[in-house]
Image (tube, helix red, strand yellow):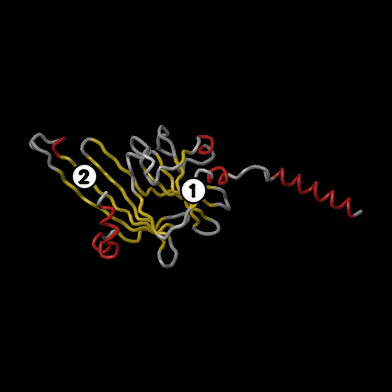
Amino acid sequence: MRKAIITILTLFIIVSCKQNNCNEKTKFTRLSVFYKDTSFLDMFIYPDTKHIDSTYLFRGKQIDSITLNLFTEKITYGLPWIEGFYGIYSFKLNKQYTGLLTRTPGEYESSAVSLWIYDIKNDSIVNNVQLSNIYVDAGDTKTTNSYLFFDRGQELKVLTFIHYIHDHSLDDVEFPESKISESYSCFLTRINATKLDTLSTDLTMLKKKYGQQLIRMASY
């Protein structure tokens, strides 16, 4: 009798498992193989048009199109697929959420780096934050760098620095020689699982608190 009960329970578990797709890989399992596990307190993230160079820290591993097609347009909307998406690093935010640093298509090539927040419980990407990129067009250059870090309260924050350059000689014949204008912007953001909170856009205040980080970002 006991053996019969065990057999019935085993069959019930097998049938239940098949109905709930227990044998199928989760989307997270498929995606995570393209990332290298890491942990950090802070990380400087920058774009590089020479990303094919093996020395580029954020080169990553190309994610196949079948895996990308499992996800919504939240991560691919408006982006070209010519150069592809590349998994770089993964790190835990907590038991439910994981951060995925990913190199994504920019204006002409995969020169941007974004942070995808993955909800393991619900098996989906719930947030997408661009951390670095470079854009060059008709005398305009816009470079975005970021300092990603965990504060003392273990909250994930990002300090983003944007450098704008414009060459007026390309659009104004009155300048026989190159005349360059530059400007900067900076903002501090708290990254929660599903939302972003802008904490400050005050460049003067941010220079006082994060001077060394900003100097490093400005050098790129």
User: Which residue is disc 1 drawn over?
Assistant: 36
Q: Residue at x 44, y 48 (%)?
A: 101
Tag 2 secondary structure: strand
Question: Is label 1 in contact with label 2 (beta carbons under 8 Å)?
Answer: no
* Label ID, residue 165: 2
Q: Is residue 218 above or below residue 78?
A: below
First along the sequence among labels 1 and 2:
1
The numbered mark at residue 91 is none
Residue 25 location (% of width, % of height): 62, 43
Looking at the picture, how far across and down is residue 51, in whole percent?
36, 40
Return the residue found at the far top. Answer: 82
Q: Is residue 30 above or below residue 198?
A: above
Image depth: mark 1 or mark 2 in front: 1
> Which three-letter amino acid code belongs to the residue tagged 2?
Ile
Residue 72 lies left or right of residue 144; in this view the side is right
Horizontal and vertical percent position of residue 190: 40, 59
Left or right position of 113 against 126:
left
Nearest to the observer: residue 31 or residue 128: 31
Q: Nearer the viewer, residue 171 or 25?
A: 25
Q: Which residue type carries mark 1?
A: Lys
Mark 2: give few (<14), some (14-19) or many (20+) Cα within 10 Å.
Answer: some
Name the foreground residue: 209 vs 197.
209
User: Disc 1 versus disc 2: distance between alpha carbons?
Assistant: 34 Å
